[in-house]
Image (cartoon, helix red, strand yellow):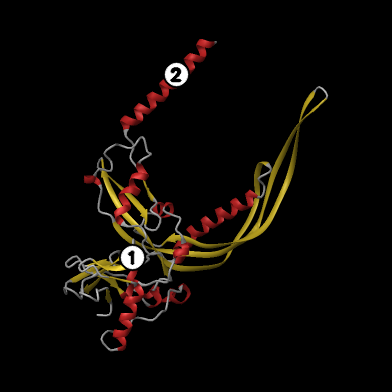
């Protein structure tokens, strides 16, 4: 069934898993390891010999050509048959990669990521899941008000590696900004201390280009987590190959580029505003009186970025966390210990009271 792609070990036929620490597809059954290129060359040879169907072409996502097609697409739960055990597997409309719940086989749903739906690029996982406990400890280690038992073993949920769909926008901003600012000079003239305030009209014009502004295209992913998990190193972005998904979950986008453009525009405009303001750094009391900034030459690419997700349950509440699968950066909310907060408050209050008492005594 060409709707499903499976990564099988050429040596023993067991499922292959992409390993971040080695950058190889490894077999956890016989220990064999292969490069992405080796597997691809093997499949090409089998396809040439008629033993395997040829893989889909190299067409990648282009929003302009795909937009009309997407509007007609039926987003419904689909049923697939696992090629290894034959079990029926239900997949949500946006699922692109998963594990068979019956035989643990790694499955890529080809029709969700081929042709016009094929991402333009992917950053493979680089952080080994075994290193996550250390990254998490660094995250909460310097939080003095965190409850001591928050990250105990029995409260830490399963860590899931997910390739999250992101839109990356390129654009240009041109425009102008009018500001008012002041300079203040203090000097002495005879027996007088003088202050001279000068007022300026500051007019600025210019343009700037922005590249790779990321916005997640998944409704399931909290926007605050995905924004906070940046930055990614886009120099490690490589052409998309579905074999990088082996052993992980991957979702296709459900927010299209038009849906996400306002978020990207807001980020770009805020950055452009800061750049214009920075040109008046030598002036004081700067006030913007008029701005005219325009966005144009917008282009978008579809990429998949690596994220680890896990949840901690504490005090009857779920705390959701994300880890940048490339850099190891951890983001999420943390609870605050009421006891530690009270101790900190009274300790601070006592210290301030002691300083005040000493000052009054010296008077």
Residue at the farthest right position: 190
The answer to which image quadrant residue 14 occupies is bottom left
Query: Spatial distance from mark 2 to mark 1, Cα to Cα?
Result: 56 Å
Q: Residue at x 28, y 89 (%)?
A: 49
Q: Residue at x 53, y 11 (%)?
A: 362
Quadrant containing the N terminus in the rendered view: bottom left
Above or below: residue 105 compared with residue 225: below
Image coords of residue 131 (percent x, y): 32, 53
Image coords of residue 76 (percent x, y): 29, 70
Q: In the rendered image, is residue 243 in sight?
A: yes
**Residue, disc 1:** 251
Q: Nearer the viewer, residue 341 or 20?
A: 20
Q: Nearer the viewer, residue 213 or 94?
A: 213
The numbered mark, 2 or 1, whose residue comes first in the sequence reads 1
- Left or right of 276 in this view: 349: left
- Describe the element under mark 2 as helix, strand or loop: helix
Image coords of residue 112 (percent x, y): 33, 72
- Left or right of 75 in this view: 350: right
The answer to which image quadrant residue 79 occupies is bottom left
Q: Are marks 2 and 1 in contact (CB under 8 Å)?
A: no
Q: Which mark is residue 353?
A: 2
The answer to which image quadrant residue 70 occupies is bottom left
Q: Residue at x 32, y 32 (%)?
A: 338
């Amino acid at each position: 069934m060409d709707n499903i792609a499976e990564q099988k070990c050429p040596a023993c036929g067991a499922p292959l898993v992409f390993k971040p620490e080695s950058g190889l597809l490894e077999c956890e059954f016989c220990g064999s390891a292969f490069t992405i290129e080796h597997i691809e060359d093997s499949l090409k040879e089998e396809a040439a010999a008629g033993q395997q169907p040829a893989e889909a072409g190299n067409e990648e996502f282009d929003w302009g050509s795909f937009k009309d097609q997407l509007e007609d697409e039926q987003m419904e739960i689909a049923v697939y048959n696992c090629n290894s055990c034959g079990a029926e597997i239900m997949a949500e409309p946006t699922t692109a990669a998963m594990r068979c719940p019956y035989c643990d086989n790694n499955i890529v749903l080809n029709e969700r990521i081929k042709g016009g739906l094929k991402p333009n690029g992917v950053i493979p996982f680089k952080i080994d899941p075994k290193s996550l406990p250390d990254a998490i400890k660094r995250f909460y280690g310097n939080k003095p008000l965190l409850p001591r038992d928050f990250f105990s073993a029995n409260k830490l949920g399963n860590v899931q590696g997910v390739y999250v769909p992101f839109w990356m926008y390129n654009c240009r901003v041109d425009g102008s900004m009018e500001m008012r600012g002041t300079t203040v000079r203090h000097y002495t003239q005879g027996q007088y201390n003088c202050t001279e305030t000068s007022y300026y009209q500051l007019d600025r014009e210019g343009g700037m280009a922005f590249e790779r502004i990321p916005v997640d295209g998944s409704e399931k992913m909290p926007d605050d987590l995905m924004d906070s998990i940046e930055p990614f190193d886009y120099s490690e972005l490589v052409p998309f190959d579905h074999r990088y998904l082996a052993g992980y979950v991957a979702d296709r986008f459900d927010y299209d580029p038009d849906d996400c453009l306002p978020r990207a525009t807001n980020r770009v405009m805020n950055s452009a505003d800061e750049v214009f303001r920075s040109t008046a750094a030598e002036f004081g009391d700067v006030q913007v009186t008029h701005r005219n900034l325009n966005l144009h030459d917008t282009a978008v690419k579809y990429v998949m970025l690596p994220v680890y997700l896990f949840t901690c349950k504490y005090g009857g509440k779920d705390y959701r966390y994300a880890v940048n699968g490339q850099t190891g950066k951890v983001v999420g909310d943390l609870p605050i210990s009421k006891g530690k907060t009270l101790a900190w408050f009274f300790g601070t209050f006592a210290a301030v009271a002691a300083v005040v008492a000493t000052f009054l005594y010296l008077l």
